[in-house]
Amino acid sequence: MQDSNQIDLLINQGQNKIGKKFIFGLLILLGIVSVFLYWYFFISTKEETNEISYIEHTVSSGTIADLLIASGSTSIEKKINLSFATSGTLNDILVTEGDQVEKGQLLAELDSSDLKNSYDRSNLQLKKLLDMPSDENLKNAQYLVSQSEKNLNDLLDYPSIEQLKSAEELVAQAQANFISAQENYDELLNPSVTKIDSVIKLLDQSKYSISNINLLIEKSKDSVDTSKILLIESVNKYCDSQNNLPFKEATCSGVENLPVSRNITDKILNEIFICCNANQTEMNLSKSFINANSNYISSLGQINVYKVQLKSANASLKDAQNTYDNLLTPTKNDKERLAFLEDQAEINLQKRLLSLEEIKLGSKVKDINLAKENLEKAKFSFETLKNGADVNDLSIQKLLSTQAKENISKTKLYATFSGQVSSINSKTGEFIGSGQNFVTLSDLNTIEMEIIASEAEYVEIKKGMLGIVTLDSKPLSPLIIEVIAISDVPNVQQGVVTYPVRARFIRGFEVITLLNQFIPLLESLSGSLGGGMLEGMIPGGMGGGMLEGMIPGGMGRGMPEGMIPGGMGRGIDLNSDSPLLSFLSDELPAEGMNGTVTLLKESVQDVVIIPTDALIAERSLTKVLISIEEDNFTYVEITTGLSDGENIEITSGLNIGDKIYIESDDESIQSDSIDGSASIIGNFMESGPRGGRPPR
C-alpha cells in the first residue's frame, strides 16, 4: 500500500505546469516556514508550560548490600553408582528404592550358575593337563612345526616377483612427489606471467567496484535529500490541515523524528481508508504523506545497502593486493615451507631407493638363522609334548581355576557406606554386564547447592560468601548457604562457558552464630522484592527491624545468653510460629530442586543513605539539592559509597536528619513514595525559577 506511484504522479504533473526549479524553491521555502512556525507554536510553548515538582526527603540511615544473583540446583556430594564386578543375570534384589541401608549390607545377587560352570570347566581343563598328551595337543604341536618350516622356506625364496613390483611402484611415486615439490618451489620464486596478470585483473576489478559504489552512494545521498524535502512538505500539509486527521501528535513531532515509524503509518491507513469513512481531502493528504515517508525510508535503506557493498569491495581489494604482494615478494615462511617439503620429498625418495636395493639383496642371513632356530624350537616342543604336560602350564591352569572360584564371589553386591537407595536400574531376570550401573547409593546428609556461575559471576564469587536460596518448589521457605568450593575447570556446552560452584546449607543453631552477617542480605532482598518473598519469613515488615520480626517473643527467653552475636539480646523465644524455625531445622531439601541463589558480595550497615534519584552529576562533581527558596537553588557536594541500585551510601556531605529535594515531573507521586518524611513542596509553572531547572 505504501508505494511511490501516487507521489511520482503528483511531482510529474507539477513539473509539467510550473517547472522543476520553481517547485523545488517553493518546497524549500515552505519547509523553512513550517519548521519556524512549529518551533514557535509548539516547542517554545511546551517549554514555558512544563511543570516541575520537588519532593522533600529526610536523610536517614540504613543498610546497603551489593548482591550477586545466580541459579543452581541441589545435588548430593556423596553419591555412588554401584555395579557388579562380573556379568550375569540378576537373580535377586534384596532392597527397594528409598530404603536406608548400612555399610556392608547385601543388596543383590546374580545368577552364579554360569560362573560355577566356568569353574567346572577350569577344573576339567586342569584334569586334561594332568592327563596329557592328548591327540588334539599333538596335532597343534605338529601344526606349529609345519608353520615354522613354511616361514623358513619363504625367507629362502625372498624376494618374490610381487614384492619387487610393489617396491618399484613406491619408488616411482616418491619420484613424482619430489618433482612436484621442486615445481612448487620454483613457481613461488618465479611466478608465471599468467598468474601475475590474473591477480592484476582482480585488483582492477576491485578498484572499479569501489569507484562505482562510491558514485552510487553520492547519488543516493542526493535522493535522500530530495525525498526528505518532499516528506517535510507532506508532513506540513498533513499537520496544517484543518481536517480531523489521525495521529497528528506522533506525525507532527518535528523534523528530527522523521521518518515516521511503519506502525503509525499503518494505523493512519486503517483509519483513513478502512474504518472511518474519510473524505477525499483527508485521503489525499494521508496518501501523500505515507508515500513520501515510504520513499524517504527506502532512500535511507539504499544508502546502508551501498555502504555494506563498499565494505565488501574494500575487503576484496585488500585481499587482491595481499595476493599480489605475496606473489611478487613471497614471505620467508613460504620459502622455508616449500623448501622443507622439497627436502622431505627428496629424503623419502632416497629411502624408497634404498629399500628397493635391500629387497633385491634377498633375505638377511640373521633372519634365516632365526627362522631355523624357531623351527628347531617347534620340533623340540613337539617332542616334549609327547612326554606329558609342562609344569608351567599346570601352574597356570591351577591359577585360572582359582580365579573362576573368586568370580563366583563377585555375584554378590554389598553397600559401601550407610545411606539411602536412590535408584535401582534393573529388574530381576535382566542381564547385567560387568561395571554396568545397577543401584545408586546416596548419603542424604551430604546434599549441597550446586551454583552455575557465568564467567562474569565466577570472578566475583569467593569462598566463604553467604547467600540465600529460594527454591522454585518452596518460594516462601528460603535457605541459607555458604560457598565452600569454586571449580577452576569450566563446563562448555554449545559454546556457553560456566563454572560449577559448591555451597553448603547452613542449618540449626549455626544460623544464630552467623546472624549479623546475613542481616544486610535479608534486608536488601526484602526491599527489592517488596517484602513478597520474605513476608512470611520476617513478620512485622522490615520497618520495625529484621530481627524484631524474625525472632518473635522477645530476646529474653528460650536460649542461653550470649548465643546471639553482637549483644543482640539475652535469649530467643522460639514458638511454633517462628519463621526462624525454618532455618534452625536440620531438614535439607531434596536432590534436583532448582532455585535462585542470591549471594552477598559486600554490605554496609547503619550508614547515611539517600535514594539514587537524588544525585545530580555535573562534570566531575556529585551533589544534591538541599534548599529551594523562591528562585534560589542551593546544592551541596557529596561523596558516595556502596549502592544497591535504589539507594546509595553517603560518606560525606550529608548527615542523618538533613533535608534534600528530589525533582519529579509527576505531580501524582505521593509523599510516601520515597519515605515517610517526604512531601511534595511546590510546583513551578510557566517560566519556572530563574537559572533554569537543576542540572541532572
Image (cartoon, helix red, strand yellow):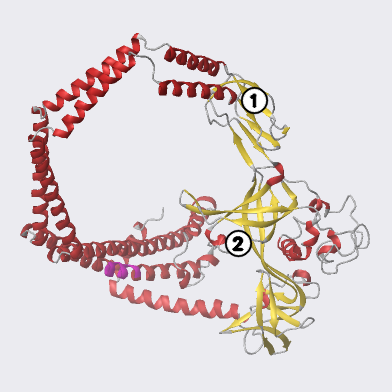
Q: Nearer the viewer, residue 281 or 497?
A: 497
Q: Nearer the viewer, residue 262 or 384?
A: 384
- Vertical order, 695 against 140 (above or below): below
Disc 2 to disc 1, C-alpha distance: 44 Å
Question: Could you tell me what secondary structure mostly forms the magenta stretch?
Answer: helix
Is 318 a magenta residue? no
Of the residues shown, which amino acid type is indicated by label 2?
A: Ile
Residue 548 appearing in the image: yes
Disc number for residue 108: 1
Please tell me which residue is depicted at 46% across the width and 72% down the height of the picture: 256
- Vertical order, 394 against 612 (above or below): above
Q: Quadrant of residue 220?
A: bottom left
Residue 539 pos. (x, y %): 84, 58
Residue 363 pos. (x, y %): 12, 32
Boundaries of the magenta span:
217-224
Of the residues shown, which amino acid type is indicated by label 1?
A: Ala
